[in-house]
Amino acid sequence: MTMASEIEGSQPAHHAAGHPFGPPAGPAGDPPLVQLLTPEGERVEHPDFPLEVTAEELRGLYRDLVLVRRVDTEATALQRQGELGIWASLLGQEAAQIGSGRALAPDDYAFPTYREHGVAWCRGVDPLNLLALFRGVHHGGWDPDEHNFHLYTIVIGDQALHATGYGMGLTMEGAESAVIAYFGDGATSQGDVNEAFIFASVFNAPVVFFCQNNQWAISEPLERQSKIPLYQRARGFGFPGIRVDGNDVLAVLAVTRAALERARAGEGPTFVEAFTYRMGAHTTSDDPTRYRLASELETWKLKDPIERVKAHLARTGQADTAFFAAVEAEADELAARLRHDCLALPDPAPLSMFDHPYVEPHPLVAEEREQFGAYLSRFAEDPASSSSTEGR
Amino acid sequence: MSARATTTLAKALNMGLRSAMERDPKVLIMGEDVGKLGGVFRVTDGLQKDFGEQRVIDTPLAESGIVGTAIGLALRGFRPVVEIQFDGFVYPAFDQIVSQLAKMHARSLGHVRLPVVVRIPVGGGIGAVEHHSESNEAYFAHTAGLRVVACSNPADAYFMIQQAIASEDPVVFYEPKRRYWEKAELDPEATPMPLHEARVVRPGEHVTVAAYGPMVRTCLEAATVAEQEGRSLEVIDLRSLSPLDLPLLCASVERTGRLVVVHEAPVFLGLGAEVAARVTERCFYSLQAPVLRVGGFHLPYPPARLEEEYLPDLDRVLDAVDRSMAF
């Protein structure tokens, strides 16, 4: 019996469609929110999403949350010190990313935006790769197939179609794995995301559309993207949508697991709206004081995704002060290592930009490479091996 | 025993697609109406019947979705061949082609390969309504990461589509829609020339005329007429627009001293501009006249009743030859 059918069997009466992913019973303005851990750190049950989590797993999730926030803080500091060109902070969205990232099976495949540092962490991508990208060393240096984690996609929503095509391929092969496509609230207005919904729906592709609704698309509030709660969009495309407390790592874990299981069982796509908040700026180039009130941030600080896990661990005695101190120390060590390695990243050699435009030889690229190399050789002894600073 | 037969360009493409699908089970066909209907030009006729709905996929009517999901399928190891129904309908997919398909290999530092073919029926001359007669090859040839080719005859169509599918790089594959029904001999057992090489389709002495796609035949007809006037035109089918086969072109220009480039696309910033610049750089001392270009005007493609005036024809090619010879 699949998890999805188990859930279906445990349907509560208040769901009109008889399915945990069914349409909401309440009015549009008061949508249900799946929550398993309150902002105060109190564990609550949800009839459709039972979750057994051991103390060790809970401590692991806490560690993930703390470490990715520390990576994020360090990256922001590196940008402020001029070492990164820009940084897109995940501050506030740690639970949405760790919860969904830890729900993935090894064979599942994730398609991120440019802010999924927490998911990258879960997929084993060294954060140094992310720093290198935002430093301008490369556009994405990891091998996607090594981590089942695709490259960061910057054009909003494009990756939703890649995820869907990948999922269609899984179906053709009869593979029992699933795909998760990450995007934000702003992306739900993009044609490509809507086309992805359509393709995934009609081809019954095993895709979880994971929308982190962080309330803001740079300066534009959600009301500029949608007049209905985002998860309700799914119904019009013919698949279920659900809203989960995106700051609750346990709820996100449980809901994403169920949605992935549903996909693997051949039941098609699911839209998961992780209701969260971008606690920082859109990127380090942004100034949110121009468009939103400080009081809004203060309200969301009370729902912090890390504090509630810490409170729960402490209150239930599943972790002691030594554990918390050890995680903090590990976070500091990680940050120090990343800072050191980031500063040590060499600029790529000038001619390396000619390395990968094509798989097969292209005479024009070869010619331009040769000409530019000859040009550089007038300034440096050995342009092919010199650092780019000499070429500038 | 020879397998030679006379076939249309559309049928040759169909045979080429079939051959590629038989050879590699990862080859898929995707597009609007490519299944039961066999495509609006019947290029995929009968393929869904023989290879099934899993490999010849009628997609939702959304070009960006078609190319975007083809990229995802390629990431999973498939080799999708995407049909864009008409040239003017590729623009909804422009972002996926230019920002994703073209750049993914470089973005991944060489980890990711996207062997996707985007087939586009191109050009005018069929009396169609707006958006059905455009020549947009310059947009894609301008984009690094894409390979762009244009077939002009059944034999090339048969081999080039298979070579494009075999390419590890993404290929934009232009099919001259007004030549779909023209017949010529095809020997499927012949040895094809490399995909990115140009070919001298008619040797000559006085002026080199370079064209591709639907204009190759127009230039051959011009050469026949010119011969009656005592002028010997060397007609070159460029075949590949990115990369360009400049060595073959320059060798010809070094012999003739004159070059006319012909395409349906507007002259301004068209392929002819790039060819003229490159040839001038390389063959400056061989040129007896500036490189001349014949093509569409700097206009939106006109209504069908005007397209015969808009499109380059035999007389406009000969006029350019006259001007070249007059220098």
Image (cartoon, rainbow, N blue to C red):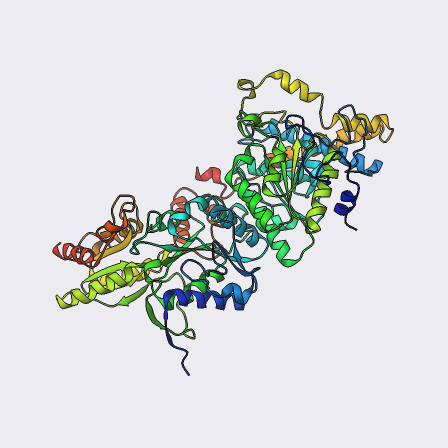
Q: Image check: A390 left or right of B77?
A: left
Q: Residue at x 48, y 47 (%)?
A: B62
> Vertical placement of A296 versus B216: above or below?
above
Question: Percent x, y for residue B299?
Answer: 27, 43
| Quadrant that contains the C terminus of chain A | top left
Task: For residue B85, say whether it is visible.
Answer: yes
> Vertical placement of A388 versus A77: above or below?
below
Question: Percent x, y for residue B278?
Answer: 29, 52
Q: Residue at x 53, y 57 (%)?
A: B57
Task: For residue A138, say whether it is visible.
Answer: no
Q: How many marks?
A: 0
**The furthest residue to the right:** A317
**The furthest residue to the bottom:** B1
Q: Image check: A276 left or right of B196?
A: right
Q: Image check: A386 left or right of B304?
A: right
> Vertical placement of B53 versus A345: above or below?
below
Most foreground residue, B216 or A48: A48
Most foreground residue, B290 or A265: A265
Q: Image check: B9 left or right of A266?
A: left
Question: Percent x, y for residue A309?
Answer: 77, 29
Question: Percent x, y for residue B97?
Answer: 46, 47
Q: Residue at x 21, y 67 (%)?
A: B204
Most foreground residue, B65 or B282: B65
> Vertical placement of B108 versus A216: above or below?
below
